[in-house]
Image (spheres, grey):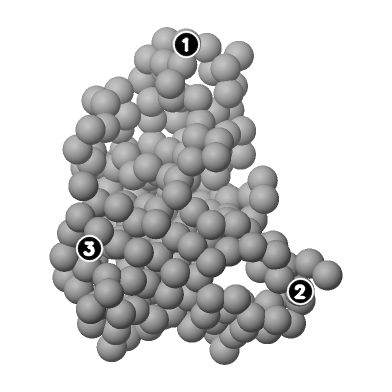
Amino acid sequence: DIQMTQSPPSLSASLGDKVTITCQASQNINKYIAWYQQKPGKAPRQLIRYTSTLVSGTPSRFSGSGSGRDYSFSISNVESEDIASYYCLQYDNLWTFGGGTKLELK
Amino acid sequence: EVQLVESGGGLVQPGRSMKLSCAASGFTFNNYDMAWVCQAPKKGLEWVATISYDGSSTYYRDSVKGRFTISRDNAKSTLYLQMDSLRSEDTATYYCARHPFGAPFDYWGQGVMVTVSS
């Protein structure tokens, strides 16, 4: 089974900051990674699929990159509505989520 | 509008069974693979099981193999998760999710809580 190591587990940022979250897969996942946002008490919302493709409705301040085993997700100019938890998901071989990153306001 | 509505959760004793349902609307149900994803309290997301659009293929995470069964009724646009031999560690919110073939989960239900406790 593919393991996804996501870091950091938590992140503190000020409004307007740029933040970056990383996910490392235990093997090459051929860019089949998606990123989700989850707010407390709500279902996850897909933001990005296939490493860097923004899903319809995702603001352009969100971005993704990477290849092979290593991937990153960034938010430029953090806004208050971005305060949430974020998860990566590999879907190259079955499906595995990263452990999550909780983004808080500094 | 795509809608996924889960039902059937609640409190159940260890070793007992529970069946979750997910009613789908707003899209052609039998064109899509479907999945269950769970989230233990204050924890991260875990994929549980997936079923192909026609029900011919099913996939499970190791910890539920032999205990959980995913199924679907395309005539009723409904997804199911039969959970047997429940354990305390199965306590979680269970989400049903749609995923186009070869693509990640795109639409999610609101979730249903399952608590396994004596």
Residue at image position (25%, 77%) is: B74
Q: Regarding mark 1 in the picture, which secondary structure is present there?
A: loop
Kindly identify which residue carries mark 3. B100
Instruction: Tell me the distance, in whole angstroms, between the alpha carbons under discs 3 and 2.
Output: 35 Å
Name the one closer to the observer, B6 or B94.
B6
User: In the displayed structure, would residue A50 be above or below residue B80?
Assistant: above
In the rendered image, residues at marks 1 and 3 fall on the same chain: no
Chain for disc number 3: B
Residue A64 image offset from top left, x and y in percent: 31, 38
Q: Which residue is mark 1?
A: A15
Q: Amino acid at mark 3?
A: Pro
- Which of discs 3 and 2 lies nearer the camera? The answer is 2
Where disc 3 sits, the SS reads loop
User: For the residue marked with disc 2, what is the amino acid?
Assistant: Gln
Give the labeled residue for mark 2.
Answer: B13
Measured Cα–Cα span from mark 1 to mark 3: 35 Å
Marks 3 and 2 on same chain: yes
Q: Quadrant of residue B56?
A: bottom left
Which residue shows up at 68% across the image and 77% down it? B86
Residue A72 visible in the snapshot: no
Q: Say above or below: B68 vs B88.
A: below
Q: Nearer the observer, disc 1 or disc 2?
A: 2
Evaluate whether residue B117 shows in this view: yes
Q: Residue type at mark 1: give it.
A: Leu
